[in-house]
Amino acid sequence: MKALITGASSGIGYEMAKELIRLGYDLYCVSRKEGDLINLSDEEKSHVTFMSYDLSIEDECFRLIDDTKDLDLDIYINNSGYGDIGYINTTDINKEINMVKLNDIATLILTKEYIKRFIKKDKGRVLVTASAAAFGAAPYMSCYYATKAFVFSLMHGYHRELRNMKSKVKVSILCPGPVKTRFEEKANTKFMIKPISQEYVGKYAIKKMLKGKLEIVPGFTIKLTHLFSHFVPKRIITKVLNKSASIKE
Ligand SMILES: NC(=O)c1ccc[n+]([C@@H]2O[C@H](COP(=O)([O-])OP(=O)(O)OC[C@H]3O[C@@H](n4cnc5c(N)ncnc54)[C@H](OP(=O)(O)O)[C@@H]3O)[C@@H](O)[C@H]2O)c1
């Protein structure tokens, strides 16, 4: 069994990779650096092929597609991503453009390609890491929230399309709230609700994806937010989400 996973060099992706190795998968791990993958045991490392790509660059996404054309994958996990926080008049537009390229453009290019390959053999699973940010909007993280809403909507559309064609290919959307990873530091933010552990989220995501769950929401508080998001007006959800992170002064 083979899986390709982006952003496995740290955080949630690293834990998902460890869980897949435990379940007997051989992994192709994509990110710019090897990062925490060097901490895997020798036995775990023997199941990992590290591939270096900067997925915020379109050509690099197409290079990855080409380099993996002969791989018979069972699972594709699209997890690379980052956020940023700040006032509209101080946030860096280039960091935001790059975020859209990584969180959205790369997700579009790669999920579409691997879903197409899976449709051909009528088998395969795709898991995309969105966020609870997809349930609403938030000031100071507007761009990040918008990138995750795009991913959430895209995957819901693909799910329905696959259902309509009676395909056995399954897609899942992971929607965590705050998780203790390097995300907080990279986004220059401070979580205002207690983050859950990356170990828990990684294991939970794999378990639910293998069960074929469409929306995967780890943690009680965010499950509740998710539930309310179905019938509470978006502006109220936005107020709640607004309190989940603040700008690190
Ligand atoms: N932590 C949270 O609270 C939280 C909540 C909801 C959703 N998420 C989402 O979860 C996903 C994983 O984030 P995390 O929290 O685990 O943070 P993380 O530890 O910072 O992991 C981010 C991963 O993305 C990779 N990455 C970043 N830029 C890349 C690029 N240009 N090309 C290829 N790979 C790149 C990183 O590897 P390299 O730097 O080596 O490239 C790393 O492996 C993200 O999509 C994030 O938006 C996080």
Image (tube, rainbow, N blue to C red):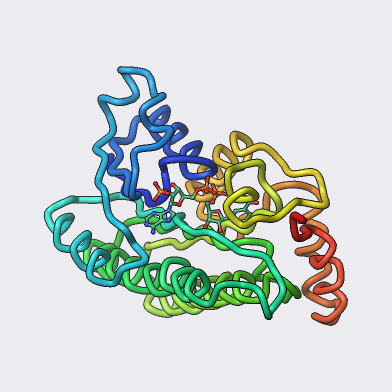
Measured from the top left, where is residue 173 in percent x and y?
A: 54, 61
The residue under the point 47% across, 67% down is: 103
Q: Quadrant of the N terminus?
A: top left
Considering depth in this image, is 115 or 65 the residue closer to the camera? 65
Q: Nearer the viewer, residue 91 or 114?
A: 91
**Residue 171, x across and y down, in percent:** 46, 62
The picture quadrant where one finds residue 107 is bottom left
> Residue at the top extreme?
42
Q: Is residue 139 left or right of residue 74?
A: right
Q: Residue at x 82, y 72 (%)?
A: 237
Relative vertical location of residue 78 with respect to residue 49 in this rendering, above or below: below
Image point 61% across, 64% down: which residue?
84
The quarter of the displayed image where residue 40 is located = top left
Vertical comparison of 64 with 50: above or below: below
Q: Nearer the viewer, residue 217 or 248?
A: 248
Image coords of residue 156 (percent x, y):
53, 74
In the displayed structure, would residue 13 be above or below residue 23? below
Left or right placement of residue 217 versus residue 225 in this view: left
Q: Nearer the viewer, residue 222 or 189?
A: 189
Give the mark count: 0
The picture places residue 25, in percent across and down from the top left corner, at 33, 35
Residue found 59% across the figure and 34% down from its top: 199
Q: Where does the C terminus fall, quadrant-wise?
A: bottom right
Farthest residue in the left direction? 70
Q: Quadrant of residue 188?
A: bottom right
